[in-house]
Amino acid sequence: MNWQIRKFELKKVLTSPIVWVLLVTFILFNGVIIFSNFYLRSDLNVLTSMVQQYGHEMNEETLTKWEQKHERLLVEANDAVGQTFDSAQAFFNDPDTWMLEEADRRKYVEIMIME
């Protein structure tokens, strides 16, 4: 008897149009959210390579290696641009840097992710 009641209730839910409308609405809403944040995928690739290179734990040794690489990348990016910035944030705060090429800006984006 109890199984028949559950079977009928499940049939009632599955045949209800409001359930299907809500299901489709939420799936579309999730799709919009996923595709609107698709640009973060390239940033996650940088983060993944950092984790592969330095590991999951940050201790004094890995922090020293990270700082050395950060300084090296910042010097290389500054040399490519021909200006000196203390950090990637300083680069993006300067309105003149938006006229530079995409490759130069991408270097600073990678440095900003490291920071």
Image (spheres, helix red, strand yellow):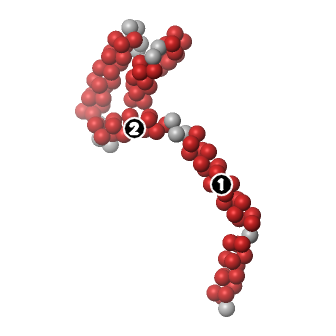
> In the image, is 114 to the left or to the right of 25?
left
Image location of residue 26, percent across then percent down: 65, 54
Is residue 60 visible from the viewing direction of this image? no
> In the image, is 19 to the left or to the right of 65?
right
> In the image, is 6 to the left or to the right of 63?
right
Question: Is the N terminus in the top left, top right, bottom left or bottom right quadrant?
Answer: bottom right
**Circle 2 is placed at which residue position?**
45
Q: Work out whether mark 1 precedes mark 2 in sequence or the reverse, and give the earlier one.
A: 1
Image location of residue 64, percent across then percent down: 27, 28
Of the residues shown, which amino acid type is indicated by label 1? Phe
Identify which residue is drawn at 52% across, 15% down. 98
Between residues 60 and 51, which one lies in front from this camera angle? 51
Between residues 21 and 85, which one lies in front from this camera angle? 21
Q: Residues within 10 Å of mark 1 (few under 14, many from 20)?
A: few
Instruction: Decide: is 32 above or below 54.
Output: below
Q: Residues within 10 Å of mark 2 (few under 14, many from 20)?
A: few
Instruction: Decide: is 109 above or below 78.
Output: below
Question: Is the C terminus in the top left, top right, bottom left or bottom right quadrant?
Answer: top left
Residue 26 marker: 1
Identify which residue is drawn at 74% across, 66% down. 17
Q: Which picture quadrant has residue 14? A: bottom right
Is residue 41 visible from the viewing direction of this image? yes
Helix, strand or loop for disc 1: helix
> In the image, is 27 to the left or to the right of 58?
right
